[in-house]
Amino acid sequence: MQQTNKKFKLVSNKKTRTILPNMFTLVGVCIGLTSIKFAFDERFGLAIICIIVAGLIDGLDGRIARLIKGTSQVGKELDSLTDVISFGVAPAFIMYFWQLNTLGRIGWLICLIYVICVALRLARFNVNSETQPSWKDNFFEGVPSPAGGILVLMPLIYSKSEIQFLMIDYSYFVPILFVLISILLISKLPTYSFKKIAVPRRLTIFLLFGVVLFFGLLLIYTYNVIVLSSLIYLLLIPFSIFHFFNLNKKFTNENIDNEEHEDIL
């Protein structure tokens, strides 16, 4: 009877742990592609929501994989491919249908440049993430592709928000923003990754409250929250650069001291 039960075991536990996060990733691909369809139909509000949902899934699939010990090389490559589609190709198409098509071939060229920069940024991340010291896990090299995808959508999101404190000429602002974000994607500027946030146990309840409050506001005031969050993210970049170079100097000095100590011994 025991042998019969073993035959009915379709997949091992390890395979199940690997498949689950990959399923999340593939759902993200479908949602990213669906945003292009909505943009083609000029339903830009739904297209924005699709990109946001794809971003949330992108933040969850890797954490789920690490939590259930289901990480794999296939999952890593699949995640990068998903990022190119959901935060490279999809935002480029959305903004092309909304504004960049008015520039003709130049608008299409700008879209191509942005998508290429997303692909280059992800390729570099896959190579560097295996060789860098552990303290650098707190930082990305350049703006990550999900953040880049949201930032290039900012003019469209801003136009739909209730925060109208600036009059913007989108015909000039959108292509300039695309070029700037493309540069930030492939730059080596350190930006916070928010991967290893250590929170004292006594403050956990406040963290949970903040997360619930954020997502509650996101559901009610979607466009306003995204605009403000994007502005806060951009304002954090100078602080992340300053923090990175301070840590780099600290660990470099420690390594020099250790080498000198070894030479003395």
Image: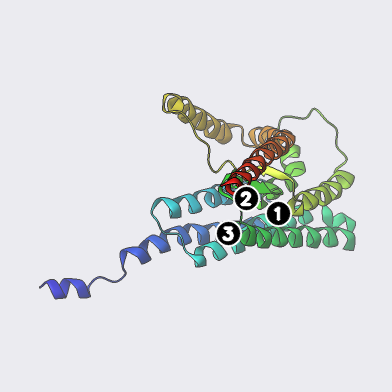
Q: Do the numbered discs 2 and 1 sit on residues whose CB atoms are within 8 Å? A: yes
- Who is closer to the viewer here, 149 or 165? 149
Q: Position of residue 251 (x, y in %)?
A: 63, 41
Q: Secondary structure at mark 2?
A: helix
Circle on res. 130: 3
Does residue 193 lie above or below 24 as drawn?
above
The residue carrying pointer 2 sits among few (fewer than 14), some (14 to 19) or many (20 or more) residues within 10 Å by Cα, namely many
Q: What residue sits right under mark 2 in the picture?
A: 51
Does residue 144 lie above or below 220 as drawn?
below
Q: Amino acid at mark 3?
A: Glu
Q: Secondary structure at mark 3?
A: loop
Disc 3 versus disc 2: nearer the observer: 3
Q: Position of residue 12 (x, y in %)?
A: 31, 68
Furthest toward the front, the residue is: 265
Question: Which quarter of the picture shows residue 130?
Answer: bottom right
Q: Residue at x 46, y 30 (%)?
A: 208
Circle on res. 91: 1
Q: Amino acid at mark 2?
A: Ile
Disc 3 versus disc 1: nearer the observer: 3
In this rendering, would 165 be left or right of 144?
right
Q: Amino acid at mark 1?
A: Pro
Work out whether mark 3 precedes mark 1 in sequence or the reverse, and give the earlier one. 1
Question: Which quarter of the picture shows residue 154?
Answer: top right
Q: Do the numbered discs 3 and 1 sit on residues whose CB atoms are within 8 Å? A: no
In this rendering, would 261 be left or right of 115?
left
Does residue 17 lie above or below 50 as drawn?
below
